[in-house]
Image (cartoon, rainbow, N blue to C red):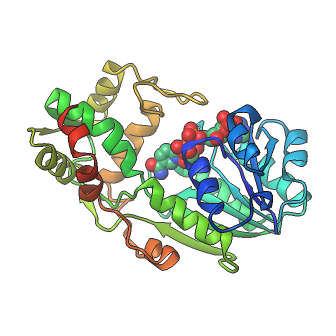
Amino acid sequence: MKLIVTGASGNFGRATAECLLERVPADALILVTRDPRKLADFAQRGCDVRRGDYGEPDSLATAFAGGTKMLLMSASKVGSRIPQHQRAIDAAVAAGVKHIVYTSYVGLDGPNPSLAVSDHRGTEELLRQSGAHWTILRNSQYIDAVIEAQAPHALRAGRWIASAGDGKIAQVSRDDCVAAAVAVLAEAGHEDQVYNITGPELLSFREIAAIIAEVSGRPIEYVVVDDEGMYAFFDSLGIPREAVPDQVVNAIPWSSDDMVSVEAAVREGYLAVLTDDVERLTGRKPKSIREMAEERRSELAAA
Ligand SMILES: NC(=O)c1ccc[n+]([C@@H]2O[C@H](COP(=O)([O-])OP(=O)(O)OC[C@H]3O[C@@H](n4cnc5c(N)ncnc54)[C@H](OP(=O)(O)O)[C@@H]3O)[C@@H](O)[C@H]2O)c1
């Protein structure tokens, strides 16, 4: 069996490939990127590194040839990913891929205002109609973004600006999302299942800010603003409003249209999803925000 990992050069994809190498031989892995030079280290270890671009169907036909099961990494331009994902699904099915595992997003039921929802709902529908087996991994928001971007900024400013109010979310570490994906990819089964990949507890950003303040030993005031206030905050950081591909500004990879809509979704309760799916899939409990903050206490204290 050959496993394809798309988005293999990114944070999620590289970690997935690394974990898969502990479970399958290197020549069972097809790693796809728009720029194979980024994965030269994996090629040297015997993985089959191939060029593929969601924008170029011909490249995908070659990239996916011979694959059995595939991780479809959601693309990066929030709000307009369905055509990219459609090309990838069509190419995978045409290449004979039997089972597609997709990195989706929690809270797709109900009128969730999050901008990312339409991409993921549309892609899930395409998968259900694709004729291939599918597994949908509805990942919650990554804790990593809190630790690496939101918390350092809030510590420097002494203020955590949020329009999410006291809405709650069970954020999850990217490593736990990767471990869940690896379990589904490396094991038999999991066909036509939806898993909600969440952290261990529902917390508001007010509670998260308090944990970061306590662990770092530095004060953070939690400041609730409306959507316009949230846009003004992101504008002040130089974050573009509209999504553009491959965008990273001040270590934050998204547009404010996306992030303000996520805050609204949290405020309105659409992301308040909590499950034990990480433990069921991986056999271990997911990491909490407190654990991740404690692991990086000195970094946070010095922010
Ligand atoms: N749940 C959350 O909180 C959360 C947060 C951040 C991201 N995400 C989702 O998780 C995904 C992975 O995150 P990450 O941190 O690993 O992102 P990342 O480091 O930015 O990696 C994105 C990957 O997508 C690939 N890609 C982008 N556009 C592509 C295209 N047109 N054709 C083929 N491949 C393309 C890139 O490959 P090349 O550049 O090598 O071609 C790269 O490997 C993101 O794309 C996003 O959908 C979720």
Is residue 107 visible to us here? no
How many numbered marks are there? 0
Given residues 3 and 127, the one toward you in this image is 3
Q: Residue at x 21, y 41 (%)?
A: 298
Given residues 41 and 252, the one toward you in this image is 41
Ligand 1 visible in quadrant: top right
Q: Residue at x 80, y 58 (%)?
A: 27
User: Seen in the image, is 101 located left or right of residue 166?
Assistant: right
Given residues 125 and 75, the one toward you in this image is 75
Q: Quadrant of the C terminus?
A: top left
Is residue 135 visible to us here? yes
Q: Position of residue 221 (x, y in %)?
A: 10, 38
In this rendering, is residue 135 above or below 75?
below
In this rendering, is residue 248 above or below 175?
above
Q: Quadrant of the N terminus?
A: bottom right
Q: Residue at x 26, y 58 (%)?
A: 291
In this rendering, is residue 231 above or below 262?
above
Given residues 279 and 22, the one toward you in this image is 22
User: Seen in the image, is 137 located left or right of residue 285?
Assistant: right
Q: Position of residue 162 (x, y in %)?
A: 25, 39
Which corner quadrant of the image does residue 228 belong to?
A: top left
User: Seen in the image, is 28 located left or right of residue 5?
Assistant: right
User: Seen in the image, is 79 located left or right of residue 266?
Assistant: right
Q: Position of residue 115 (x, y in %)?
A: 50, 43
Q: Residue at x 67, y 70 (%)?
A: 186
Q: Position of residue 16 (x, y in %)?
A: 60, 56
